[in-house]
Amino acid sequence: MRALCVIALCGLTALTAAAEDKKTVRVVKVPDGFMSALDRGKVSEPTVIKSEEEFHKVFGKDAKAEVDFKKEHLALFQWSGSGQDKLSHVAETKDGKTVVTTTLMPGRTRDLRSHVELIALPAGAEWKFGK
């Protein structure tokens, strides 16, 4: 009986995760060969990519998008900073709208490195930079 309860609970968790997945943010692999034209961009001002045409303008004609642009959009973050810099992304639903907040966790090293991070967020989601 316990085994059945555990299996049912795992199945319910998987269904809940699948439903929540539509409202989450995920990191997408930057296409191979991408050379950042913007070496010292602002992390608080990402390039938003909402269509396959825009994707190919940024990454080239041969690049393959890992998203369905009808359901998701991309945000390309480019900045220079500590080699230990990290971004965190949190998606919350408020009043039926998804709000994605990105926060920079600055590294403690004094080395200057270029960073590029590409994320997929739900289409129509509001985005903001947190401090």
Image (spheres, rainbow, N blue to C red):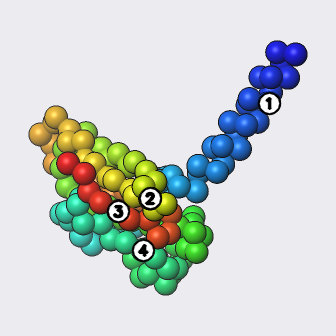
CA separation in Å, label 1 and label 2 = 31 Å
Eye-nearest disc, 1 or 2 = 2
N-term-proximal mark, 1 vs 2 = 1
List x then y, in percent, for residue 84: 25, 39
From this view, report whether residue 108 is shown above or below residue 130: above
Q: Residues within 10 Å of mark 4 (few under 14, many from 20)?
A: some
User: Along the horizontal axis of the image, is 55 left or right of 3?
Assistant: left
In the rendered structure, find residue 26 and report the number of the disc placed on it: none
CA separation in Å, label 2 and label 4 = 25 Å
Eye-nearest disc, 4 or 3 = 3
List x then y, in percent, for residue 6: 77, 23
Residue annotated with mark 2: 95
Q: Residues within 10 Å of mark 1 (few under 14, many from 20)?
A: few
Q: Which residue shows up at 85% across the image and 23% down it?
A: 4
List x then y, in percent, for residue 130: 25, 51
N-term-proximal mark, 1 vs 4 = 1
Q: Tell me the amino acid under the disc marked 4.
A: Ile
Q: Tell me the amino acid under the disc marked 3.
A: Trp
From this view, report whether residue 37 is shown above or below residue 6: below
Residue annotated with mark 1: 8
Residue annotated with mark 4: 49
List x then y, in percent, for residue 34: 40, 67
